[in-house]
Each structure stands twice: as structure tokens, then as C-alpha cells.
């Protein structure tokens, strides 16, 4: 290491905590209630989505082993399909990240109100802004510090999510699972709806690949962290849903604002609203920290390749691309205003649905990139082909479940990146012309001498 250079690389467990922490967010506390109206079919949805998520994590593990550099999905798309596809994957992935981040700050403040009582909308906004600003500044300290913090926070939030279900499994009432489909929809339609809901819990399985350039032995560490983190999240989601549905009656669960608190009360007795709210706050803050680690590094690789403005290349002495972090957080702030009015909150949920659809487009292109690499290498096996086909089938099925309307609206978000793409291409051409003119001037000067 050069003198004065800071060694800011991280190892396996901070990366596992990053993946797990980004997956296990506020949704873990709310999804059991949202799924209650569908009946036991929701468990089938969790199993299918978990299998699909693990297949995708294995594909990303293969991709990161081949290209252990900072960039994640953008890097794979660009290497496989060129600058244009790479740019739009980077734009879409970056945009959905900072669009989704406000939900974590809003959810954290929502759980704070459970502890301290109902707060007025402007107090909520102030707390959300303070949380976002604090974690933004904290992320400027570098991946080593934020990675260790993420490991600590993830440990704090994962332990209760495992302990309560492991004890609660002995209190499960089998009669609660007697109704397979209570939604009024056909089994196939109900399964599609459940799959889209549960998929929200796995958005972020690829995040370990994004800061790969700052990871020790990235070609091994990142794949291991991606698969381990996704598997831990799948276990937490499935076990938690089974136990919550098993100890809380379907009628009570469907109307519950805090399903984990209701489950804890059924298992241990007493009032568990406050402890569960505190655990939920920790969960939301940990996920926000993890996503801020990622969101600042998404445009970093693209800036190095001349597809994003050079400002995104600038780093602190700890290796953090600080403008990426700051600009992403600034883009997040307008969405925090949506928490002030309920009607806007509903609109915000609509945007989140679009973001989920957009990540599915990113996943689909990443799997296609995986197939392109296999074709170029000509050293693949049947297991590699089956893995890719499984991940691609799941991604396309989930996109179909999202509906054409959501896919269309997600494509509109991609189109919003057209002006910057045109601008960057013009700058690239101008830079190339200037370079040619300078070379011609040097040659003329040399010939005159």
C-alpha cells in the first residue's frame, strides 16, 4: 500500500450484513398483514419468490466472480451489451435506489410515533430529513466504518427476527392455515399478486456486487456474501410469515398494524408494541445505511467509463464517491414531502411499485448478460445453463405479474435519462475532436521544427 493511502477494503461478514441488511427492511414487519387477505397461498408465494431470489443471487455470484469491480448490474450490462445498454441500466438502477430510500426514513419515523405517540406531519418530515442527513454524512466516512456499522445494526435486527419465530413455532395453530386462498381471486391470480408483494422483500440481493472494488478478494467474497445474505433473508421471511400467520388469527392479522407485536403478545403475553417498534426502527435505519452505501457507488463506475458526469468520480480519502452520495440524497428529499399528505403517500407507494418493476428489468438484463458471458467463454456446463434459465424464467414471470402498465411506467423512468445520455455522448465526441486537434497541432509543430 502506498504511503498515505487509506486501506478501506472490507471482508466477508460486513458484505453479508450489507446484503442481508438491504433485503430485510421495513417490509418484514408489514408483509405478514398485507399477505393475510390471500390466505395460505402467500406461503407458496414466499417459497417461489425465495427460490427465484436465490437463483438470481447465484447468477450475480457468477457475474461478480467474472468481473470483481465496482459497478454491479451496470458493469455487467455494459461489458455484455455496450455503452448504451449499460448507461440505461445504471440510470434506472440509480434512480430506483434513491426513489426507494425515502420509504425507509418514513417507515422509521412511523415506528417512532408508535413509541412517542402521534406526531404532526411537519415534525415527521423534520425527523425524516434529520435521519437522511445524518446517515448521508456518516456514509462519507468510508466503507470500512459504515460496513462495520452495518454489521452491528444487521446483527441487532436479525436476532429478534429469528428468535421470536424460533420460539413461536411451538405456539402455531394449524387451523390458521386451513384456508388456502381467501382473496376471491383465482389461485393463479392470487399467486401472481403475492409474488409481486413478496418480491419487494428481495429487492437489493445484488447490492453486494456494487462496491466490489472496495472488497478484499472480491472474486470470492462478493459471490459468497450475495448468496449467504439472500439465503438468510429468505429464512427470516418464510419462518417469520409462517409463525405470525400461525399464532395470530387470520381475521386479526388482516387488520393488524403491527403483526410482529401481535405475534409476540400471543407467544409471551404482555404488551410488545414498544419493543417491536424499536426493533423496526433499527431495521429501517440499518437498511437506509446499507442502501446509502450502494446508491453513491452506482454512478461511480459509469462516470469512469465516460457515461455519467465526471463529478461522480470524485472520492474522499476513504474511497467514498461523495458526490454520488450527496446528489442521491438531495434527489431523495423531495419524496420526503410526500409523507406530509396522505394522498401523496398513496402516490408514493405507486412509485415504489414502479421501482420494483424497474429492478426486475435490471435483473432480466443482468441474466441475459450472464448468458452472453457463457456464450463468449464457451466453457459452461449444463448446471450453468439451468441456473440462468431458472433465474430468467423467474424474472420474466415476476414482470408478467407486475402488469404491462407498471412495465410501461418503468420504461418512462428510463426515458427520463435520455437527455443526459445525449449530453454525455456529445461531450465524448467533442473531447475526442479536441484530442485529435491537439495531436494534429503537435505533429505540425514537430514538422515545422
Image (spheres, helix red, strand yellow):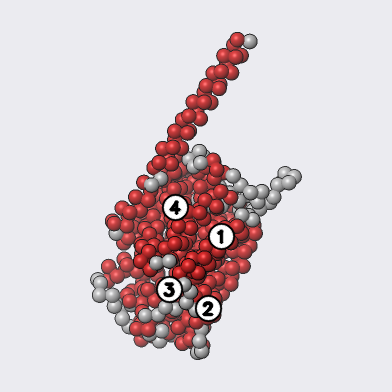
- What percent of the width, then of the height, locates residue 386? 40, 55
Q: Residue furthest bottom?
A: 269
Q: Which residue is mark 1?
A: 133
Q: Which residue is mark 2?
A: 116
- What percent of the width, then of the height, locates residue 416? 38, 47
- Taking the image as drawn, is residue 37 in sight? yes
Question: What's the distance in space between the residues labelled 3 and 4, CA to CA?
Answer: 24 Å
Q: Nearer the viewer, mark 4 or mark 2?
A: 2
Question: What's the distance in space between the residues labelled 4 and 1, CA to CA?
Answer: 19 Å
Circle on res. 30: 3
Label located before the other in sequence (4 or 2): 4
Q: Which residue is mark 4?
A: 95
Q: Quadrant of the C terminus?
A: top right
Circle on res. 78: none
Label located before the other in sequence (4 or 1): 4
Label located before the other in sequence (3 or 4): 3
- Crowding near pointer 4: few (<14 within 10 Å), some, many (20+)? many
- Taking the image as drawn, is residue 236 in sight? no
Q: Report helix, strand or loop for mark 3.
A: helix
Amino acid at each position: 500500500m502506498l504511503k498515505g493511502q487509506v486501506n478501506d477494503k472490507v471482508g466477508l461478514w460486513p458484505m453479508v450484513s450489507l446484503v442481508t441488511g438491504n433485503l430485510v427492511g421495513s417490509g418484514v414487519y408489514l408483509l405478514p398483514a398485507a399477505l393475510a387477505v390471500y390466505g395460505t397461498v402467500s406461503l407458496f408465494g414466499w417459497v417461489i419468490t425465495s427460490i427465484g431470489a436465490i437463483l438470481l443471487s447465484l447468477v450475480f455470484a457468477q457475474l461478480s466472480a467474472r468481473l470483481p469491480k465496482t459497478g454491479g448490474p451496470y458493469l455487467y450490462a455494459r461489458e455484455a451489451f455496450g455503452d448504451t445498454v449499460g448507461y440505461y441500466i445504471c440510470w434506472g438502477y440509480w434512480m430506483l435506489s434513491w426513489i426507494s430510500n425515502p420509504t425507509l426514513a418514513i417507515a422509521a419515523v412511523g415506528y417512532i410515533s408508535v413509541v412517542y405517540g402521534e406526531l404532526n406531519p411537519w415534525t415527521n418530515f423534520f425527523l425524516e430529513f434529520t435521519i437522511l442527513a445524518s446517515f448521508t454524512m456518516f456514509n462519507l466516512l468510508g466503507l470500512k466504518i459504515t460496513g462495520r456499522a452495518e454489521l452491528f445494526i444487521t446483527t441487532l435486527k436479525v436476532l429478534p427476527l429469528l428468535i421470536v419465530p424460533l420460539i413461536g413455532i411451538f405456539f402455531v395453530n394449524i387451523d390458521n392455515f386451513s384456508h388456502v386462498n381467501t382473496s376471491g381471486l383465482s389461485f393463479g391470480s392470487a399467486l401472481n399478486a403475492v409474488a409481486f408483494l413478496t418480491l419487494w422483500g428481495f429487492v437489493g440481493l445484488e447490492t453486494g456486487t456494487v462496491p466490489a472494488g472496495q472488497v478484499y478478494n472480491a472474486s470470492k467474497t462478493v459471490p459468497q456474501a450475495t448468496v449467504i445474505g439472500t439465503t438468510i433473508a429468505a429464512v427470516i421471511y418464510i419462518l417469520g410469515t409462517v409463525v405470525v400467520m400461525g399464532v395470530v388469527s387470520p381475521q386479526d392479522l388482516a387488520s393488524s398494524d403491527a403483526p410482529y407485536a401481535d405475534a409476540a403478545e400471543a407467544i409471551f403475553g404482555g404488551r410488545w408494541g414498544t419493543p417491536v417498534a424499536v426493533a423496526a426502527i433499527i431495521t429501517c435505519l440499518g437498511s437506509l445505511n446499507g442502501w446509502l452505501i450502494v446508491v453513491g457507488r452506482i454512478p461511480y463506475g459509469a462516470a469512469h467509463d465516460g457515461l455519467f458526469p465526471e463529478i461522480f468520480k470524485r472520492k474522499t480519502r476513504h474511497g467514498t464517491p461523495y458526490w454520488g452520495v450527496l446528489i442521491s440524497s438531495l434527489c431523495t428529499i423531495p419524496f420526503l414531502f410526500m409523507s406530509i399528505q396522505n394522498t401523496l403517500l398513496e402516490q408514493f407507494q405507486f412509485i415504489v411499485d414502479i421501482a420494483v418493476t424497474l429492478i426486475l428489468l435490471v435483473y432480466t438484463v443482468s441474466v441475459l448478460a450472464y448468458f452472453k458471458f457463457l456464450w463468449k467463454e464457451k466453457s459452461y456446463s449444463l448446471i450453468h445453463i439451468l441456473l440462468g434459465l431458472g433465474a430468467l424464467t423467474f424474472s420474466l414471470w415476476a414482470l408478467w405479474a407486475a402488469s404491462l402498465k407498471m412495465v410501461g411506467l418503468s420504461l418512462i423512468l428510463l426515458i427520463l435519462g435520455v437527455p443526459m445520455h445525449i449530453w454525455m455522448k456529445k461531450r465524448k465526441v467533442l473531447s475526442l475532436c479536441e484530442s485529435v486537434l491537439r495531436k494534429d497541432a503537435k505533429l505540425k509543430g514537430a514538422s515545422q521544427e
